[in-house]
């Protein structure tokens, strides 16, 4: 599907009014696939995402002996649950650069009986995992680092998990917490998790709790999520229709906000969404876009006077959509400061450095202060023609493409990296273009 050249020139787009149906959320798909495999019955998952990150999870479940019927034509997957049992006793999993797959499977494999290796591409070997390995060891798991302490690859010598009380200080990634929550029900003593201090990327933990509820896992959580108790029981096999991916939606909403006279509706994401990134529409509203959020869709339109203004905002709750704001910040009136996004440094690339370097190429000055990034508008509104390096990071490619829809002069290097979560991203942008009025 995505035979892209090494470089893509992005040209500005004219006014458009468009409604998009997006593939399923990466975060929900990888959670649902694992929970379904661990459940006690068949689960029919619809609107599943088929992209690199979810393919890695599907391949891994297959290698582990789970019965999975992939129905690509229907965007669906039928998973036969094994009620907490890992069928294979040996497996070596290469999970690419899929953070969710690495973290979720590392925890899940401790439930097995056998020896498993979890690994990924070179970048994955630089993404820390000590804050998941240490608590799993505390809960009774035997896990060895085979290369570098605190990083994949990992060798898991599994014989079920004891479970019990666990106290965690703030983590670099919420995925460690999600990984623990998804298996707590099959630990012999369950899981009594106490989270001290602020929860990084917190809406993703809330999303996990929402899914556990869907699969009827007995969970009791305090309102502030500082205390989460899971009793030993089962994950029930239930069907699930996966919400469209809200991080992907951020590109289409942002494109509408920055293109005078334009409007974009994303179906299936509204007030009922359990994805934190669905709230990105409200961030666009704060900078001046017109936003209508209904139960099952959200429409973002450019402001009547075309003027969007800079903002000072903490986006720890939406680290992925935060990149979309960073990439359109050069177009805003006044400076933009995005706070508390320090864990950008341990994602697909060091996103803090990558964002700063690539924004600076366009003439928009970006400065980093601790875990905050400040971005200044383009001088005189002029973008300096820039070839954007994407660092094998899908969001670098997609966010800078959005900037290129507003200003002439953006070229994207190695665009094929979008395959991680939205393989047909550029085709979708072309669809927007064919429906748009000619650009001025
Ligand atoms: O749980 C998840 O599905 C995710 C959590 C976030 O990571 P962190 O918790 O590491 O910020 C996010 O960036 C990632 O794309 C998906
Ligand atoms: C950070 C991301 O992915 P992950 O951590 O799941 O690899 C992302 O998709 O932006």
Image (cartoon, rainbow, N blue to C red):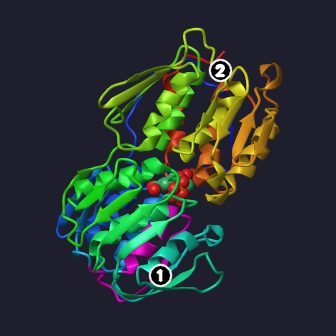
109 inside magenta stretch: yes
Q: Position of residue 84 (x, y in %)?
A: 26, 76
Q: Earlier in the sequence, mark 2 or mark 1?
A: 1
SS category of the residue bearing label 2: loop
Asked whether disc 2 touches disc 1, contact meaning CB atoms under 8 Å apart, the reply is no
Residue 256 in view of the camera? no
Q: In the rendered image of this protein, does residue 45 appear above or below residue 329?
A: below
Front-most of 388 and 181?
Answer: 181
Q: Position of residue 135 (x, y in %)?
A: 48, 74
Q: Is residue 346 rendered to the left or right of residue 264?
A: right
What's the distance in space between the residues labelled 2 and 1, CA to CA? Answer: 48 Å
Few, some or many C-alpha atoms within 10 Å of disc 2 (few <14, some 14-19, many ≥20)?
some
Give residue 148's quadrant in the image: bottom right
Q: Position of residue 91 (x, y in %)?
A: 42, 85
Front-most of 260 and 41?
Answer: 41
Q: Position of residue 156 (x, y in %)?
A: 46, 85
Residue 173 in view of the camera? yes
Give the residue displayed 63% in from the left and 47% down from the top.
341
Q: In the image, which disc is placed on residue 137?
A: 1
Give the residue displayed 34% in from the left and 65% down from the top.
182
Front-most of 287 and 197?
Answer: 197
Q: In the rendered image of this protein, does residue 47 appear above or below residue 348?
A: above
Q: In the rendered image of this protein, does residue 27 appear above or below residue 358?
A: below
Q: What residue is shown with label 2?
A: 309
Disc nearest the viewer among 2 and 1: 1
Q: In the rendered image of this protein, does residue 116 appear above or below residue 369?
A: below
Give the residue displayed 33% in from the left and 26% down from the top.
294
Give the residue displayed 51% in from the left and 40% down from the top.
427
Q: Which residues are magenta?
A: 85-110
Figure quarter occupied by ligand 2: bottom right
Cβ of mark 2 under 8 Å from ligand 2: the answer is no
């Amino acid at each position: 599907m995505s035979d892209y050249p090494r470089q893509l020139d992005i040209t500005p787009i004219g006014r458009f009014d468009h409604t998009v149906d997006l593939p399923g959320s990466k975060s929900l798909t990888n959670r649902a696939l694992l929970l379904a495999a661990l459940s006690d019955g068949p689960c029919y998952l619809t609107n599943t995402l088929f992209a690199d990150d979810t393919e890695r999870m599907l391949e891994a479940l297959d290698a582990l002996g789970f019965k999975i019927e992939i129905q690509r034509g229907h965007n669906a997957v039928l998973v036969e649950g094994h009620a907490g049992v890992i069928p294979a006793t040996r497996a070596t999993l290469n999970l690419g650069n899929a953070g969710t797959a690495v973290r979720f499977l590392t925890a899940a494999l401790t439930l097995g009986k056998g020896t498993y290796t979890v690994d990924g591409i070179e970048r994955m070997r630089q993404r820390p995992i000590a804050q998941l390995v240490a608590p799993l060891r505390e809960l009774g798991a035997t896990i060895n680092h085979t290369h570098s302490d605190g990083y994949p690859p990992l060798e898991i010598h599994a014989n079920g998990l004891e479970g019990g009380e666990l106290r965690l200080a703030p983590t670099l990634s919420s995925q460690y917490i999600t990984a623990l929550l998804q298996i707590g029900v099959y630990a012999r003593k369950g899981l009594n998790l106490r989270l001290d201090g602020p929860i990084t990327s917190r809406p993703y933990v809330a999303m996990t709790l929402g899914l556990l509820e869907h699969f009827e896992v007995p969970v009791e959580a305090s309102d502030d999520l500082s205390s989460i108790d899971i009793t030993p029981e089962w994950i029930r096999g239930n069907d699930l229709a996966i919400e469209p991916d809200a991080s992907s939606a951020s590109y289409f909403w942002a494109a509408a906000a920055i293109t005078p006279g334009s409007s974009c509706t994303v179906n299936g994401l509204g007030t009922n969404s359990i994805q934190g990134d669905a709230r990105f529409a409200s961030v666009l509203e704060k900078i001046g876009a017109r936003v209508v959020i209904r139960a099952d869709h959200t429409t973002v339109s450019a402001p009547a006077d075309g003027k969007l203004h800079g903002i000072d905002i903490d986006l720890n709750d939406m680290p992925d959509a935060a990149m979309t704001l960073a990439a359109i910040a050069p177009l805003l009136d006044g400076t933009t400061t995005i706070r508390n996004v320090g864990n950008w440094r341990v994602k697909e690339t060091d996103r803090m450095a990558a964002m700063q370097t690539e924004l600076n190429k366009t003439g928009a000055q970006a400065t980093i202060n601790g875990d905050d990034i400040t971005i200044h508008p383009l001088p005189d509104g002029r973008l300096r023609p820039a070839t954007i390096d994407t660092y094998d990071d899908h969001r670098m490619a997609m966010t800078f493409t959005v900037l290129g829809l507003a200003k002439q002069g953006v070229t994207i290097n190695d665009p094929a990296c979008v395959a991680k979560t939205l393989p047909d991203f550029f085709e979708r942008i072309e669809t927007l273009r064919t429906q748009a009025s000619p650009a001025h």
